[in-house]
Image: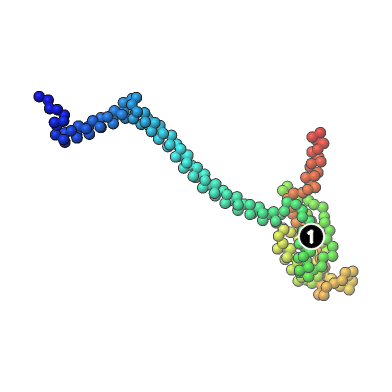
């Protein structure tokens, strides 16, 4: 005679319920059409989409770090560019340059008697702006003047240097005490952009457009 379920010992009833629960869960996961199966499929699909996204996020973190490094390099290059633009400016800045030379001469105790601009020479990547100078003063003051020229913010080359002893009594200028040397030389500075060249290029291009 079959025994009613309620009359089973409670351990057997508990074991039965546990087994039934396991069977129902497995059916929910693996039997097509059941809600649990649908949710499981969606979960697996979402996990499959997450994996490439995690890889993309990792790659973006690398790019973010690289971007910070590039920004630091750009800032350093900007500072170098600003320094180079001071040494070799884009424009001629003739007035400022002449004032720099004149201040160096006055500070050294040298008198500049004449300063004549020579024609600008065009090079592949820059322009040369030379000046012919005549100056006089004490010998060591002239040496100090050349030393100060080398320490100016702009690049300056000194060439065609000719020094001679100075006869103060025969000079047409008023000489400072101790003046003993007269010199003629050329100083050349540089810039990268010529307004005259740009204007000439623009005027030459205008007829071609017509």
Q: Position of residue 42 (x, y in %)?
A: 39, 31
Q: In the image as oriented, which residue stretches furthest toward the front? A: 6
Q: Position of residue 115 (x, y in %)?
A: 83, 61
Identify which residue, 31 or 111, lies in the foreground.
31
Residue at 31 percent across and 29 percent down: it is: 28
In this rendering, does residue 164 appear at all?
A: no
Identify which residue, 127 or 90, lies in the foreground.
90
Q: Is residue 11 left or right of residue 113?
A: left
Q: In the image as oriented, which residue stretches furthest toward the bottom? A: 177
In this rendering, does residue 40 appear at all?
A: yes
> Tag 1, which secondary structure?
helix
Asked if 50 appears above or below 146 in the picture, the reply is: above
Residue at 60 percent across and 50 percent down: it is: 74
Residue at 82 percent across and 55 percent down: it is: 118
Residue at 72 percent across and 53 percent down: it is: 89
Asked if 116 appears above or below 175 in the picture, the reply is: above
**Quarter of the image with the N terminus in it:** top left
Q: Position of residue 202 (x, y in %)?
A: 79, 41
Q: Which residue is mark 1?
A: 98
Q: Position of residue 112 (x, y in %)?
A: 82, 65
């Amino acid at each position: 005679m079959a025994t009613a379920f309620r009359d089973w010992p409670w351990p057997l009833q508990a074991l039965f319920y546990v087994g039934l629960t396991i069977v129902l869960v497995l059916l929910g996961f693996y039997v097509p059409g059941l809600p649990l199966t649908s949710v499981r499929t969606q979960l697996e699909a979402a996990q499959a989409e997450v994996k490439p996204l995690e890889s993309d996020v990792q790659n973006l973190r690398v790019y973010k770090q690289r971007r910070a490094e590039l920004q630091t390099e750009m800032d350093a290059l900007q500072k170098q560019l600003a320094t180079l633009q001071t040494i070799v400016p884009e424009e001629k800045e003739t007035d400022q340059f002449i004032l720099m030379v004149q201040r160096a001469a006055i500070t050294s105790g040298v008198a500049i008697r004449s300063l004549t601009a020579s024609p600008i020479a065009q090079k592949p990547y820059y322009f040369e702006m030379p000046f012919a100078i005549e100056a006089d003063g004490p010998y060591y003051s002239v040496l100090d003047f050349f030393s100060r020229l080398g320490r100016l913010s702009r690049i300056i080359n000194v060439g065609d240097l000719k020094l001679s002893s100075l006869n103060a009594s025969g000079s047409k200028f008023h000489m400072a005490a101790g003046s003993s040397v007269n010199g003629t030389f050329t100083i050349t500075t540089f810039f990268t952009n010529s307004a005259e060249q740009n204007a000439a290029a623009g005027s030459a291009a205008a007829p071609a457009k017509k």
